[in-house]
Amino acid sequence: IVGQPKVGFGSSNDGNTARRAFENSEIFSEITGVDVDVVKRMHIVLITISSGYHIDKFEVYCTDTAKIIVNKYNWYIMPLSIHKILIHSCSISKQFDLPIAQYSEEALESLNKLIRNARLHHTAKISRLSTMRDQIHYLFIRSDPKISSILFANHREYQGKALPTDVLNLL
């Protein structure tokens, strides 16, 4: 039941619901009435942005997707959030040193796991002072952009699954 909020959980408009909808593009297209090609292209766009890699060949794909949407749905004004993603995400991502996904809230949440792992496995637990010192040193090393990119280089996954070929072609 997508249209009804779960009691105690807020709205059902969360990332997991959206992920599941886009993974079943044909069914999602049939339910919403949006062209299946548009749904698949938006799925590729969203995965590419959140992949954590620098996006090189992305601008043409986004522009083509925007043109398809405008041509098929010229009666509907494109939402500002979709416009920002399709038209401006490439120029915005070029302004940052790290890939755009590494500035997201998801990246901050995953940092909690890294901090816990650093405390449990990379610190001397002789005293609070030595534990905190070791932990901050470890986190400084891990936060270096060069080291971070080396650790990330072989990680070709999104949500625990291999990145789709269409996404890999855009990176």
Image (tube, helix red, strand yellow):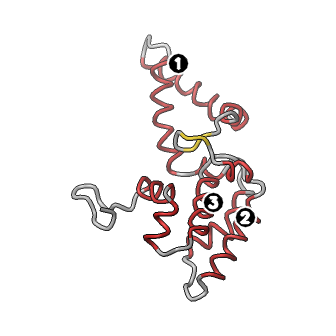
SS class of the residue under badge 1? Answer: loop
Identify which residue, 82 or 122, lies in the foreground.
82
Q: What residue type is labelled 2?
A: Tyr
- Label 1, label 2: how far apart the Cα atoms are: 43 Å
SS class of the residue under badge 3? Answer: helix
* Direction bottom: furthest residue: 75
Vertically, is 140 above or below 53?
Answer: above
Residue 107 on image: x %, y %: 54, 45
Q: Which amino acid does label 3 sit on?
A: Val
Q: What residue type is labelled 1?
A: His
Structural crowding at the residue carrying mark 1, measured as other residues with C-alpha within 10 Å and reported as few (<14), some (14–19) or many (≥20): some
Residue beneath disc 1: 122
SS class of the residue under badge 2? Answer: helix
Residue 24 on image: x %, y %: 49, 57
Identify which residue, 48 or 142, lies in the foreground.
48
Residue 118 on image: x %, y %: 51, 25
Q: Do the residues labelled 2 and 3 touch (CB within 8 Å)?
A: yes
> In the visual, does 63 lie left or right of 82?
right
Q: In the image, what residue occupies the spot 62% across and 73% down?
A: 83
Q: In the image, what residue occupies the spot 73% across and 57% down?
A: 95
